[in-house]
Image (tube, grey):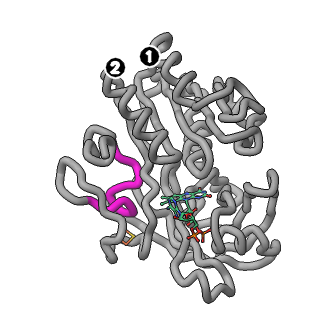
Amino acid sequence: MPIVRLCEDALVLHKHHYNAQYYKLTLRAPRIARLARPGQFVHLRVPHSDACFLRRPLSLANTNPQAGTVDIIAKVLGQGTRQLADVDTGVALDLLGPLGKAWPVLQAGQSVAMVGGGVGFPPLFFYAQQLHPACRVTFYYGGRSADDILEEADLARCSVRVAIATEDGSKGVRGRVTLPFEQGLLQDRPDVVLTCGPTAMMRAVAELCQARQVTCYASLEERMGCGLGVCIGCVVRTSRGFERVCTEGPVFNVQDVWEWAHA
Ligand SMILES: Cc1cc2nc3c(=O)[nH]c(=O)nc-3n(C[C@H](O)[C@H](O)[C@H](O)COP(=O)(O)OP(=O)(O)OC[C@H]3O[C@@H](n4cnc5c(N)ncnc54)[C@H](O)[C@@H]3O)c2cc1C
Ligand code: FES
């Protein structure tokens, strides 16, 4: 299938601040909305910012092809995501996308465990909404505190089983999300595991899956320059040689990125 990448001036239609850290932007980007699949991302230019020379990669959190809109959910980490949080509705953002490879296509009836949190939540959230009702989805959702847990109502509406773990115990069980995930692996043994979030968490998930021979895909979050496969700034060693996270990824079968998983 040919790779199609589009550049769109995407109007900010709606802005929602979940809390001081996280926000969602709904953007008018009809061509990207039509093509994008869960797991893909857009590369976004932060408007009117000399400091943010490079675009910022942000996963698609949902699309509505009929309305011609895409949602992104971002966490304020540095200057770019902070400035983006302050853009007004009606401003046009320069988007490049959809970029990268999507999550694997799953068969109806398969059971899926998603493990993620923080900036890794949006691409899993997008897929969880699409998989319903074809698959049985359990979402192991981790964060430092209750502020990191978003869109619970929408996950419940999609009949996704949600198991929450926060490090301070302010929501769900206290501790790391790998705790409930490990219990789930033993009790329910999913057909496939999808993970996105902090690298240490994804490595732990990969390890648990390897020990029980469960197929696991991880969406790697490397820093990116061009996002288009040109600068070679985002390479990872795979079983096929070096590959670009922005182009051959960001989604990899963890078996293919064994060195990354065991670094
Ligand atoms: C494929 C992909 C999809 C992503 N999807 C989302 C998303 O949906 N929502 C979201 O909030 N963020 C997402 N990110 C991360 C996001 O791109 C960074 O948080 C953002 O670029 C930071 O920009 P900044 O200017 O705010 O911070 P900077 O000033 O550039 O950096 C601030 C801090 O964040 C760290 N950082 C920056 N980029 C990354 C990165 N890619 N991975 C890990 N740490 C980083 C830096 O080391 C630094 O400590 C994604 C990243 C990738 C590669
Ligand atoms: S970011 Fe330039 S090759 Fe991936």
Residue at 24% over, 55% down: 237
Q: What residue type is labelled 1?
A: Arg
Say whether residue 68 is visible.
no
Residue at 23% over, 51% down: 238
Residue 126: image x %, image y %?
60, 45
User: Does the stretch in magenta take in 218?
Assistant: no
Of residues 29 and 172, the one drawn nearer to the viewer in this rendering: 172
Say whether residue 102 is visible.
yes
Of residues 85 and 180, the one drawn nearer to the viewer in this rendering: 180
CB under 8 Å between discs 1 and 2 = yes
- Count the labels in the image: 2
* Residue sticking out furthest to the left: 240
Disc 1 designates what residue? 189
Give the quarter of the image for residue 163.
Answer: top right
Residue at 30% over, 41% down: 262
In the picture, which quadrant includes the N terminus?
bottom left
Q: Give me the C-alpha separation between circle 1 and circle 2.
A: 9 Å
| 150 displayed left or right of 35 | right
Residue 104: image x %, image y %?
40, 41
Q: Is residue 232 placed above or below 20 in the rendered structure?
A: below
Quarter containing ligand 2?
bottom left
Q: What element carries label 2?
A: loop
Residue 147: image x %, image y %?
76, 44
User: Does the stretch in magenta take in 247?
Assistant: yes
Disc 2 designates what residue? 212
User: Bounds of the magenta span?
Assistant: 243-253
Q: Is mark 1 on a helix, strand or loop?
A: loop
